[in-house]
Image: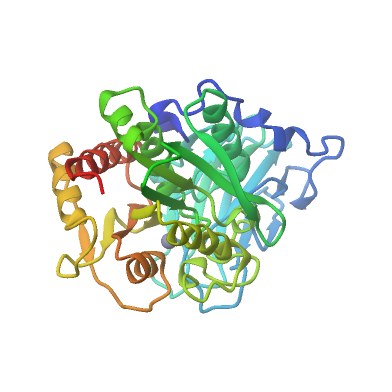
Amino acid sequence: MRFAALGAVALLAGCAGLGESPARAAEPTTQGPEFACESELLAIDTAFPGGALSSCTIDDDGNVDIVIAPEDEPPINCSAWYAFRITPRGVSETQVKLSYTACGHRYWPKTSTDLATWDYVPAGDVEVDEFSGLDFARVDLQLGDEPVFVAGQEILPQETYDAWMLGKAQAGQAQRFVLGNSAEGRAIGGLAIGNTGARELVVLVGRQHPPEVTGALAMFPFMETLMADTDLARAFRERFLVVAVPILNPDGVARGHWRHNTGGVDLNRDWGPFTQPETQLMQGLLNAIAANEAQDLVLMLDFHSTSHDVFYTIPDELPTEPELFTARWLERYGELMPGYEVNRDSNHTSGSSVSKAYVYDTFGAPGVTFELGDETDRELIGRIGVQGAVAMMETLLADEAQ
Ligand SMILES: [Zn+2]
């Protein structure tokens, strides 16, 4: 199957192509990649944003053994990310063995030659050993003349977000803003969509967890739908302001982390303590909303990925403002997604330092962790993003303005 990383709604139309974003153009181009391993037959490197492996070796037949390790010592969330580039030197096929120092294989391998269009490695060409505690995968790859990227998910680095957001701002569909910098100095910000003088604010967050690309694949069409030239979206933008921070952990994304930022912290366990520069930026944003008597936070959605599509929500028994938003939103969403089962898992632990609990504890507003399955069909993810946004706008507009 072939699909474009952001293809569902033609996200990149009208802005710089993937390889032409300002950030990437500024990188030195005179020197080639440093190879993690190489032989006469092929070479392997990770010299691109998101590239990650621990070590690799190549045997005399051109088959590759790659070891994948987390950024920090276990225990760590088992999101065993990998991304590397194979540069063929005359061979037409290779077998890559992916071995893991912790957790084992999770992400189905995908390939691309241009970082924009991706193919699943065919099922018959991937063998996962499920019998040992640390399972590994063998991946048979056909090679052409060009280098090929192999990764656990589509690679969506900060450069892609920046180019996309720049295009939206230049088209007058939203305003760009910068909250501040990550630990390594990457700018963290996003898009303000709608009425900047609005009382009612919606906050969107993404990529706290670097490998959770399918959450991002839903968040892009979600934001597109809010910016669309439709009666619904125009009415929504008149009354509401959406503050979207789509990549909160750009360092972890650039380094191909499984979970953490460069401080060794899971950012979605740091809402409340706010010990990290990245989460402190969200704290500052939320504090500013809380301190402004002319603004109310009405909703926060935090986009993630897990084994299947599911909404982690506040239980309906707990009062929220807007009242019963989550139940009404997901009911409408279900109507817009016939034949699709909407999974909702409700719980709330007061004082727990995940984003949705913090937002509820602090504002009484509904917080939702919007989870997409790792391997959910990419066209379906596009529809989920669009209809999730439509249902959200309809539900929020159904209430009287505060
Ligand atoms: Zn997550």
Give the residue drawn at x 40%, y 38%. Answer: 223
Considering only vertical position in the picture, is 274 above or below 300? Answer: below
> Where residue 40 sits in the image (x, y, percent)?
78, 43
Q: Which of the pair 142/224 is nearer the observer?
A: 224
Q: Is residue 155 visible?
A: no
Q: Which of the pair 141/82 is nearer the observer?
A: 82
Considering only vertical position in the picture, is 42 above or below 355? Answer: above
Give the residue drawn at x 36%, y 39%. Answer: 222
> Where residue 268 sits in the image (x, y, percent)?
46, 67
Ligand 1, seen in the image, is in the quarter at bottom left
> Where residue 12 sits in the image (x, y, percent)?
51, 27
Give the residue drawn at x 32%, y 78%. Answer: 350
Question: Looking at the image, which residue sits at the far right?
Answer: 30
Q: Which of the 4 image quadrants contains residue 165?
A: top right
Q: Which of the pair 46/216 is nearer the observer?
A: 216
Give the residue drawn at x 34%, y 71%. Answer: 361
Considering only vertical position in the picture, is 82 above or below 171? Answer: below
